[in-house]
Amino acid sequence: MKYNKFFLAGSVIAASMTLGSCVGDLDLTPTDPSSLTPGQFESDPAGYLTRSIAGVYLQYATYGANGDASVQGFDGGMSTFQRAVFILEEVPTDEASWIPNDADYGLFQYGIIPTSNTVVMGTYSRLFINISMCNQFIQTVNDGYYHLNTPELQATADEYVRQARILRAGAYWYALDNFGNVPYADENVKMGEVAPQLSTDFAEGRRMVYEKVVADLEDVVAWYKQNDPNNRPPYGYVGLDVAESLLVKYYLNAGVYTGTENWAKCLEHAEAVIGRLGKGGFKNSGLCQNYFQNFGANNKDFAIGGANAVNEIIWTIPQEQTTQNPSGLGLMSFANSTFMCNAWIGDAPGDADFSCTIAEYNSGKGWKCMVTRPEFVEKFDWNADYSVSPDKRVQFWKTSKDGFELQNKSLMQADWGSNGYLAVKYSNWAMDDNGIDAANSPEATEQLGGDYAMIRLAEIYLSAAEAILNGAGTADKALTYVNYIRERAGLAPYTSLNLVELQDERCRELYTESTRRSDLIRYGKWISGYDWSWKNQVPEGSDFSSNFIVYPLPSTTVSRNGYTQNPNY
């Protein structure tokens, strides 16, 4: 199947799958005027089966069917999956901030989030809409709507069900990580039913959700290893490698979610992923030769199923400009690579004492909405005035060499250019092993066509190293894994490695990839022990209240469904 055809067809059918169960409490808007219903599936079981799973995937790539936002009263761009998790995992941290002075969104850059915050409601809603779509796809298969009357059709449906379970686990990781004692729903929670919290006790409820999701993922992984051990799904789909990489993320944070660490299982699954994907590329590690091949206009080539033999991007969120697709159709949003480039950049005013142009990034527009914080910048190697670094991963940044100021005198959009560096890693340039490939780059448009890399093999290497340094394996292997990453960045390899060095290397490699808040919590540096500019709305930073270890559940959700709010909110 052609991926774009698959995805675009899904926009037609997404609205036919009623949004119930765990999002029954949300204010949703119609996503398609089509009157298509499951009663029509019998006329073309294979076609409707494919379009239905496409509707599930669509919720991870854009706002909703036909580009309409699924969440009422929440900006369409913000309501995408990628931007929702970026808001939760990055905006309150040292790596990024959102500087337009929106009343509710603006609070996120300080980490102070009341229960009535509309952005909490919007991000929570996005995660549970996606979970609900996965569940309801599985229900429609299990309830016989597709009339699967051949073994081939049944096998296809079974595979799509496995994919829906993997996607559901992906959304649940962000829900569990950020909201704690969330309600749990699988395909056994029927449409219209309210998904239950598994316990009124915060720690017990969070642990129980973790255990259910992990058990389901383990079952999916076991099936693949027994029946399809060389599973390599087509471009844009999820399969064994995404499922096992998600298990790495769950086990990496097991101590936070359950109170009991599980470094051995984290390493076991990380090593399995590395064993399959760790071939070719930089030093035969499975990493791209050039770091920015993960973040350029042609990064789909480096995703599983892509044109290149090296597939560092394990879970990709596809995008495509209409100008690149012969059909004239595309798959775009104001999220993903578009957001990750344009939110940072803009044309500097003609009389400014700093320089930045959107042409440098081959983009058609810049928003001037984000800056980074000096404490994050200082984790890289720099010369005396923080203008030049030997670390290749800062190649596209705007720093003091361009007239930008390191310190955050404010987190206000009016001060863009004089209140922090721009930590840009995505662009609209095609990339080859040597860097920018201008001759094969697309035209400059506002909505970029590069994919978004949700999980990369580099993250799996770093997670394996962390598990090793916490007692799960031999230190020499951790050193090898981390040095792949350092040497690709143009830095001298470590001769020895400790956890503090590893934590900073993880920050440098995975910056703005929606892991930072989770990492700081796991390191014990989120609430206290590490300050960054404007943390807790204090210029030099200050400790958070202990309840900020998770966000509050949205007040509307709690009141409508009778849920127990997270402690001390």
Image (tube, helix red, strand yellow):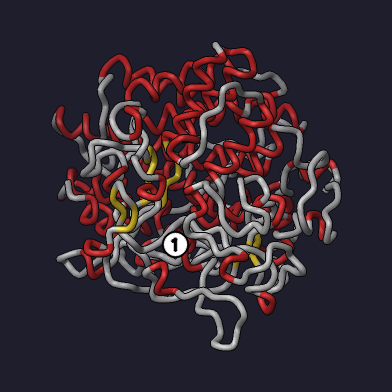
Left or right of 432 on screen, residue 22: right
Where is 259 relative to 22, above or below? above
Q: To which residue does mark 1 refer? A: 63
> Residue at position x 67%, y 43% from top?
179
Q: Position of residue 270 (x, y in %)?
A: 46, 23
Residue 478 seen: yes
Left or right of 148 on screen, residue 13: right
> Residue at position x 54%, y 66% from top?
344
Residue 112 seen: no
Q: Amino acid at mark 1?
A: Tyr
Q: Residues within 10 Å of mark 1 (few under 14, many from 20)?
A: many
Q: Position of residue 550 (x, y in %)?
A: 73, 43
Number of marks? 1
Secondary structure beneath dot 1 equals loop
Q: Residue furthest bottom?
A: 351
Q: Residue 507 or 318: which is nearer the viewer?
A: 507
Q: Residue 398 or 385: which is nearer the viewer?
A: 385
Q: Position of residue 281 (x, y in %)?
A: 30, 34
Q: Quadrant location of residue 276? A: top left
> Residue at position x 78%, y 45% from top?
548
Q: Residue 53 or 226: which is nearer the viewer?
A: 226
Q: Quadrant location of residue 174? A: top right
> Residue at position x 68%, y 24% from top?
255
